[in-house]
């Protein structure tokens, strides 16, 4: 079976800065692949380039389709959900409107979204801008669950959340991962170790390590690759 | 007191026209970052479309029917001009806002020149029913019938637009796109369709504004440059109201209408300065920007 995502020689320049310098990686179908690396190495840019939100060169094949020149909405309709780093819920819209806007299939799966995040149901009419950071993150994830997309690109879901909330979130993501392929950008190594099976490490705009999540247990490797001490 | 009320009524009508002219401009900028300087041209073309249709209708039509046809033609004319502008000229220039602004200026100049060449520089008279030229009087209180039409249509459009933006999927898409266009695309939505739709809606309202301006404040005359002078006030309304906000446009349009009308009467008639109403609007703009740089309803990012 083909991979969910195949990237070959991906280059992205943003305002003159060569952010991605030939990234090649593959994301097998099923489970969680974590995209790791220090701040500013191009993890978010990689996700954005996959979606066509950043101008790129190189080959990106998603679910067997060469997406060269595709506009973002077409890539998404292929079955790719995106949970961006800063949630990017629409602050002026209600929770209900945010969700309605995300519906791309005839029968959106609200049951799944509410089963994981029951709070969204009770706050249906509330403006998304007045939700807490954690609630906004739930809404951002719920948006991609409605369509049961086979591929999810999730950028730093735990960022800025209290430890208790992170625990709930990881439980939810673990359940979501049983039915989808997730490419996860995450700084919190405890979260990575709990969710991911595979890791891809970026440095200076290139892939410097690809392997199993167990590789991170070696503190020297973690230190060298991520600039952090081995996580607990 | 009755003079005061007469002015209140006519400034409401002026505000309604400014709202129709400005709200499309505001939505277009909010969603697409395009400062559409061809918007005045849509207003002018709306008025000309109404006039052109009226001159081609059979003489058996009664005056009221002719006027309704003019209104419909103005709306459709403005919508068609705006839709074509977006598809043919704006769309190839996505991501290049400066080029888009320049192309709208060029289009405006070209269309005005074509109208001058085709119809001449003198004003044309729009056929309207006698009732529309008359007014209801009670002592010194004068309520121009054309103002009733402008206020009624302005309120109807405001209500319809609010409903559309709140209740329909396209409306929600447009509101979301004004906030964060990229995220709308990342939800799998073809935002280009929303762009065309916003242009068409804005153009329809502009066409209506152009025609209503002729029947309320220009003595039923239309001229190739009328849209450009309206555009200046529409731009001021958009900035005062806050870019991308319909409610802001409505409030600012009323404010500008009231300030302009009252100043013109109370200061203009006594000082002999005919343009003092326009000056007062610019002062209002400066005061609002000093107090709220993003406009009355502008969102802080």
Image (cartoon, coloured by chain):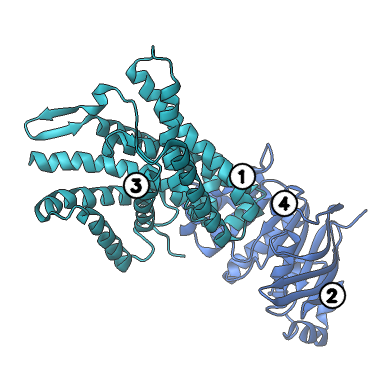
Q: CA distance from mark 4 to mark 1?
A: 24 Å
Is B67 on the left or on the right of A176, as rendered? left
Rendered location of residue A127, percent (x, y): 47, 53
Q: CA distance from mark 4 to mark 3?
A: 36 Å
Q: Indicate which disc, 3 or 1, sits on the residue closer to the N terminus.
A: 1
Name the mark nearer the viewer: 4 or 2: 4
Q: Is residue A59 visible?
A: yes
Alpha-carbon distance for marks 4 and 2? 31 Å
Q: Mark 1, chain letter?
A: B
> Residue A98 location in percent, x, y?
55, 49
Image position of B217 (left or right of A20): left
Number of numbered callouts drawn: 4
Q: Classify residue B140 by image quadrant.
A: top left
> In what element is the residue under mark 4?
helix
- The nearer-to-camera label among 3 and 2 is 3
Specify the subunit that label 3 lies on: B
- Contact? badges 3 and 1 (CB < 8 Å): no
Of discs 4 and 3, which sits in the foreground? 3
Find chain B in the image and tell me its colour.
cyan
**The residue tagged with tag 1: helix, strand or loop?**
helix
Residue drawn at 68 percent across, 65 percent down: A155
Above or below — where is A38 with respect to A27?
below
Up the image or down, B285 lies above or below A114; here it is: below
Point 40% across, 35% down: residue: B47
Across and down, in percent, residue B18 comes to 34, 45
Check residue A76 in the rendering and tell me which mark sits there, or answer none.
4
Q: Which residue is mark 3?
A: B250
């Amino acid at each position: 079976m083909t991979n969910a995502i195949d990237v070959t020689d991906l280059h992205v320049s943003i305002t003159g800065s060569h952010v991605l310098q030939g990234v090649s990686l593959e994301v097998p179908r099923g489970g969680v692949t974590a995209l790791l690396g220090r701040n500013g190495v191009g993890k978010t840019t990689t996700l954005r380039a996959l979606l066509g939100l950043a101008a790129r060169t190189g080959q990106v094949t998603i679910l067997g389709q060469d997406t060269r020149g595709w506009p973002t909405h077409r890539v998404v309709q292929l079955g790719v959900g995106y949970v961006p780093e800063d949630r990017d819920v629409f602050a002026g819209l209600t929770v209900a409107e945010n969700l309605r806007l995300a519906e791309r299939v005839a029968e959106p799966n609200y049951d799944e979204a509410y089963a994981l995040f029951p709070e969204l149901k009770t706050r249906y009419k509330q403006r998304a801008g007045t939700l807490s950071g954690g609630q906004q993150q739930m809404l951002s994830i719920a948006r991609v669950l409605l369509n049961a997309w086979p591929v999810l690109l999730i950028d730093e879901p735990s960022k800025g959340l209290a430890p208790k909330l992170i625990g709930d979130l990881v439980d939810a993501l673990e359940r979501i991962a049983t039915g989808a392929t997730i490419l996860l950008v995450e700084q919190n190594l405890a979260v990575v170790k709990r969710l991911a099976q595979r890791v891809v490490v970026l440095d200076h705009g290139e892939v410097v390590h690809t392997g199993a999540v167990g590789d991170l247990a070696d503190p020297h490797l973690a230190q060298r690759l991520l600039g952090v001490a081995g996580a607990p | 007191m009755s003079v005061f009320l007469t002015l209140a009524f006519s400034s409401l009508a002026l505000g309604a026209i400014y709202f129709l002219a400005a709200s499309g401009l505001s939505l277009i900028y909010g969603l697409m970052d395009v400062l559409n300087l061809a918007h005045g041209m849509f207003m002018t073309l709306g008025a000309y479309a109404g006039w052109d249709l009226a001159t081609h209708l059979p003489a058996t039509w009664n005056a009221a029917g002719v006027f309704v046809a003019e209104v419909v033609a103005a709306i459709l004319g403005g919508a068609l001009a705006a839709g074509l502008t977006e598809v043919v000229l704006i769309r190839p220039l996505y991501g290049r806002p400066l080029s888009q602004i320049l192309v709208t200026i060029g289009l405006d100049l070209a269309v005005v020149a074509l109208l001058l060449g085709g119809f001449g520089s003198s004003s044309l008279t729009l056929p309207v029913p006698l009732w529309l030229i008359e007014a209801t009087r009670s002592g010194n209180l004068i309520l121009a019938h054309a103002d009733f039409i402008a206020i009624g249509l302005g309120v109807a459009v405001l209500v319809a637009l609010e409903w559309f933006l709140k209740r329909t999927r396209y409306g929600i898409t447009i509101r979301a796109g004004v906030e964060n266009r990229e995220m709308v695309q990342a939800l799998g939505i073809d935002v280009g369709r929303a762009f065309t739709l916003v242009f068409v809606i804005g153009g329809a309202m502009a066409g209506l504004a152009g025609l209503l301006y002729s029947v309320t404040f220009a003595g039923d005359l239309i001229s190739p440059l009328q849209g450009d002078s309206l555009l200046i006030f529409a731009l001021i309304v958009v900035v005062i109201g806050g870019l991308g906000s319909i409610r802001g446009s409505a409030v600012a349009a009323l404010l500008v209408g009231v300030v302009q009308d009252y100043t013109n009467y109370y200061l203009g008639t006594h000082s002999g300065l005919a343009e003092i109403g326009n000056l007062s609007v610019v002062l209002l703009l400066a005061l609002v920007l000093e107090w709220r740089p993003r406009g009355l309803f502008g969102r802080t990012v």
